């Protein structure tokens, strides 16, 4: 596990973009193409903005994304399809993009495309309740499906309100189509970009606890190639002496 601590969210984004670009370019050099998964949400913007400016042959990159609210139209400000089309897809020339449309019917086709070949890089954010994708605690660590319908808990809903996507908690959809924990762990490399003080509790719990589905992000510490990018605010509550890597794993901390 690599932990990279940057001064602030902007520096985190630049450092993470450099690292991610290197991973994508390495996959293209080795295989002629790269397959990636993207997270969405306010915390990912400082990474996506510099990433699209990196020297990457995007025409050789296929993109998937993690999740979408059930029955939320793409025109809604909170739609992750809208988010990705406006902030990422429209700005580059991807080989292909496969989006979750928020219906159960989309799962079969997405699963077939997703499992056609390995995913080289997964950009997996961590929520304020330490969820990954919309796998809120207690997360399902057992299913081997690629996507499932999940229920959103109140902490998750309040994060969406706090970020300005919905006016009240009652406006947040109750369910989402989410990539599973099992499928996320199938990524050959996982990069988590987690800036801002509102994520400090989640980062602390992730790093200072053993694997538990009550803190879903803890499972990523057992991945063979996991890089966590934080800023000084999101890392502020971590006691480095209490960091608990997964069994048999080690970690490094770099300040960039």
Image (spheres, helix red, strand yellow):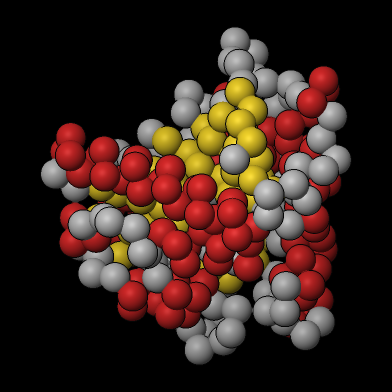
Quarter holding the C terminus is: top right
The structure residue drawn at horizontal position 64% and vertical position 28%, both measured from the top left corner, is: 253
Residue pushed farthest top? 248
The image shows residue 18, relative to residue 106, as above or below, that is above
Q: Nearer the viewer, residue 235 or 149?
A: 235
The structure residue drawn at horizontal position 24% and vertical position 60%, both measured from the top left corner, is: 58
The image shows residue 102, relative to residue 66, as above or below, that is below
The structure residue drawn at horizontal position 17% and vertical position 39%, both measured from the top left corner, is: 29
Using the rendered view, name the quadrant where residue 62 is placed.
bottom left
Q: Nearer the viewer, residue 227 or 182?
A: 227
Horizontal arrangement in the rendering, residue 18 relative to residue 32 (left or right): right
For residue 162, say whether it is visible: yes
Horizontal arrangement in the rendering, residue 63 relative to residue 102 (left or right): left
Residue 28: percent from the left, percent from the top?
20, 44
Horizontal arrangement in the rendering, residue 110 relative to residue 42 (left or right): left
The structure residue drawn at horizontal position 18% and vertical position 35%, both measured from the top left corner, is: 30
For residue 141, say whether it is visible: no
The mark total stands at 0
The image shows residue 111, relative to residue 72, as above or below, that is above
Quarter holding the N terminus is: top right
Residue pushed farthest left? 32
The image shows residue 181, relative to residue 208, as above or below, that is below
Q: Nearer the viewer, residue 246 or 139?
A: 246
Residue 103: percent from the left, percent from the top?
47, 71
Residue 120: percent from the left, percent from the top?
33, 40
């Amino acid at each position: 596990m690599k932990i990279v601590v940057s001064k602030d969210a902007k520096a985190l984004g630049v450092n993470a973009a450099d690292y991610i670009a290197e991973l994508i370019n390495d996959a293209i050099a080795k295989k002629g193409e790269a397959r990636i998964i993207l997270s969405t949400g306010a915390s990912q913007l400082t990474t996506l903005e510099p990433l699209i400016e990196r020297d990457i042959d995007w025409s050789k990159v296929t993109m998937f994304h993690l999740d979408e609210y059930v029955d939320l139209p793409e025109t809604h400000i909170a739609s992750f399809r809208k988010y990705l089309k406006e902030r990422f897809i429209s700005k580059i020339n991807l080989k292909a993009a496969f989006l979750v449309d928020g219906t159960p019917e989309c799962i079969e086709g997405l699963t077939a495309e997703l499992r056609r070949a390995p995913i080289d890089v997964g950009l997996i954010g961590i929520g304020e309740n330490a969820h990954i994708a919309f796998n809120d605690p207690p997360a399902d660590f057992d299913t081997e499906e690629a996507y499932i319908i999940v229920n959103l808990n109140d902490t998750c809903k309040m994060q969406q309100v706090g970020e300005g996507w919905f006016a009240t908690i009652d406006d947040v959809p109750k369910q989402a189509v989410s990539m599973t924990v099992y499928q996320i762990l199938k990524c050959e490399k996982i990069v988590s970009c987690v800036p801002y003080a509102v994520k400090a509790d989640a980062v602390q719990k992730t790093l200072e606890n053993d694997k538990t589905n009550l803190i879903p992000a803890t499972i990523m510490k057992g991945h063979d190639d996991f890089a966590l990018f934080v800023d000084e605010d999101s890392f502020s509550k971590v006691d480095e002496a209490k960091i608990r890597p997964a069994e048999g794993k080690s970690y490094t901390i770099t300040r960039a």
